[in-house]
Image: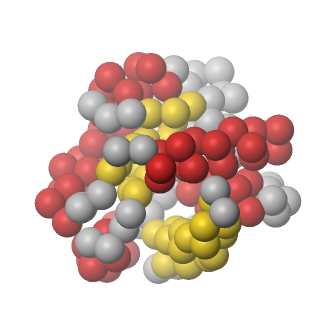
Amino acid sequence: MSSVGKSSLLSLLQGREISKERIPTVGLEIENSILDGKKVNIWDFGGQERYHFMWQDFLRGAGLAVLVCDSTEENIKKTKDIYDKFSRYLNSKVIAIANKQDLPDALSAKKVQKKLGMRTYGMSAIRLDLRDRMREILEYEINTN
């Protein structure tokens, strides 16, 4: 799940400029944010296979797990495989973000949801006008069962 836009979504959420240069996350980055008046920690896992070994320990304590895919058939399959591999470590709600909806060949969030079998929201991490929408999605999902 590398290069799907996880770090760009985090930058969008935090109100930072979205870099045009794509630099893969090495290991894990943890940031604080305020959602619905509550301080939350957001974990941005490096998507490369070599970092998967550390995911299970962090996933156990998550209040909400957000899987990000790039809205392509190939990546949806990889995302589903990762979910199947790690779902036993999750004690939380899981949602998906179908990122890169701005690309012409992107599958709709509705189609991605059907393939993944979990609530899925469409997003484009490079669109600054969607920052509030990203925040609303996370706040809603954190506050509902």
Q: Is residue 8 above or below residue 119?
A: below
The residue depicted at 57 percent of the width and 50 percent of the height is 139
User: In what quadrant of the picture does the C terminus appear?
Assistant: top left
Q: Is residue 8 something one can see in this rendering?
A: no
Instruction: Indicate the quadrant where residue 65 lies.
Output: bottom left
Q: Residue at x 52, y 33 (%)?
A: 121
Position of residue 49 measured from the top left corner of the image (x, y, whole percent)? 34, 67
For the residue pair 143 and 69, the one nearer the viewer reads as 143
For the image shown, how many numbered marks are present on the structure? 0
For residue 76, side relative to residue 143 (left or right): left
* Residue 99 location, quadrant: top right
Does 138 sit above or below residue 129? below
**Applied colour scheme:** secondary structure
| Closer to us: 73 or 128 | 128
Measured along the vertical axis of the image, is residue 135 above or below residue 44?
Answer: above
Residue 73 drawn at (x, y percent): 39, 29
Give the camera-side residue of 18 and 105: 18
Coordinates of residue 38 in the picture (x, y in percent): 60, 67
**Left or right, 76 with reference to 105:** left
Measured from the top left, where is residue 77 in percent x and y? 30, 38
Q: Split into 4 quadrants, where in the image is the N terminus?
A: bottom left
